[in-house]
Amino acid sequence: MSRQLSFDFSEEVTFPITTPLLPIRPKPLEGEILSSWLTRLAFHNGIAPSQLSYQLISTSYLLSIEVDRIPSQHLLKSITAHTGISENEILKMAFSKYEDNIHLRFEKHGNIPHVISPGYKNIKTGALRGFAFCPDCLREDREPYFRKQWRYTFVVSCNKHARLLSDECSNCGYSFIYFRSLGNREEKYERDSIVICQHCAFDIRNTVTKPTGDKIIPFIAEIQRKLIGATVKRWSVDFDNFETVYHAIPWFAGIKLLVRFLSSYATSSELIRDIIDGKGLPFDHTDFKTILRSNSQFPESYPAHKIVSVGVNFEHKTINGRAATLAILSVILDNWPQSIRQVLQNSTQSQQYWALLLNADTPHWIYEALNPCIQFAKLLPFEERGMIKQYLISKGYSKPTQYHINNFHQTGTFPLLNDKEKKQALLESRARFIHKDDIEKKMKRLRKKST
């Protein structure tokens, strides 16, 4: 019989010839994401996820460093040694399995295209999102767990229960992060602690359905199902109105360009109106921008210095914002490319936007469809854009964006920071956050002493 695990965190973790197995080792469930399984693993053994992190890799930040994207070899070997689960089974729960599928290569840091990055605050991206979940699914589970599909940007509803997902506690309003659960607030973690809010101890399985938000479900259920199918089959085989079947990488790269276009300032409300007019969507063109740029509601008790604005990336949008965008995207793809060609012909601003994107790196199904309706003669020539790009590189911009190039062409000024200035601004921003956090901790200590 194996020895029981001793949690002595004062020593570095080593791997002897016989590594003690965790006393309780739940198996991964169907479609479960790695961080969910590790959280359940900790709670089953009556400890916090941070304590499990110490045992596995000698740090308490195992889950907060986005373990779901690319688990390290050290972590894989450690988990296998303590649980008996094979490395292949562990990798099936991570997003690294989808490399060469929805994206060529996943980076260790930053955003993963089409994947939500949960977290309270992120100085670099401004992300402020929790883990999405369907309360009905969690309630029906024999043991509640979180699905990998719920992390996709294009999965905003549960087709089984016909309701929008949620990513915050309906009781206190905070973003829901399951591996920060407080258990029963006495640090006695139990199996179902994964569904307990980390702030108010509310059971998120009791989240009430919002009928107003669920009106959009019939308009997004089909496109959501098709996009999920493309991640599994690696081909856009379910989009029958397209003459050609596309591989998942160029397909999802094109999808990202389209959702980026819909959320861009270059896309006017009138253009949205021309796309969705007569389609019966539960919102009109004047409401779309408001829905798209809406942020989560924060409780009055939320510290003001921790509220940061959500970035422009689709991965940072609210569930309602992404659902509205998917509904419009469904309308566009159902009549591709005629639907978008017709509206672009009357929008010089939108033509200029696409002219800056259409190049050798643009997915060919987007390029071939939109290139004929763009009047390049009225826009900045490619040769001149190339010259401006080289000039900006010489001035310290390692990766000039099309916005840099277009703005410099129009104004002759440098509107955004170059690499050196960006680095300095990031360091100053981090220093401000660290300083505020130190003050907050100091005030807490003083309050404890006074009581």
Image: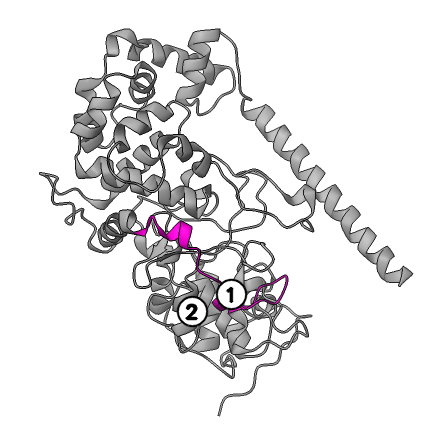
Q: Which residue is mark 1?
A: 204
227 in the magenta segment: no
Q: Locate residue 218, reporting x and y percent.
A: 27, 51
Residue nearest the observer in this picture, 162 or 109: 162
Residue located at (63% from left, 63% from top): 200
Residue nearest the observer in this picture, 326 or 110: 326
Residue located at (18% from left, 48% from top): 235
The answer to which quarter of the image holds residue 145 is: bottom left
Q: Locate residue 373, reporting x and y percent.
A: 19, 18
What type is the residue that disc 2 sits on?
Leu
Q: How many marks?
A: 2
Q: Judge from the rendering whether residue 199 lies leftward or rightward of residue 151; answer left or right.
A: right
SS at badge 2? helix
Q: Which residues are magenta?
A: 195-217
Above or below for 79 versus 153: below
Q: Locate residue 208, reporting x and y percent.
A: 47, 62
Label 1 close to label 2 by CB (< 8 Å):
yes
Q: Which mark is residue 138?
A: 2
Mark nearer the N terminus (1 vs 2)? 2
Q: Main secondary structure of the magenta part?
A: loop
What type is the residue that disc 1 sits on?
Ile
Q: Which mark is residue 107?
A: none
Disc 1 versus disc 2: distance between alpha carbons? 9 Å
Residue nearest the observer in this picture, 203 or 6: 203
The residue positioned farthest toward the left in the image shown: 243
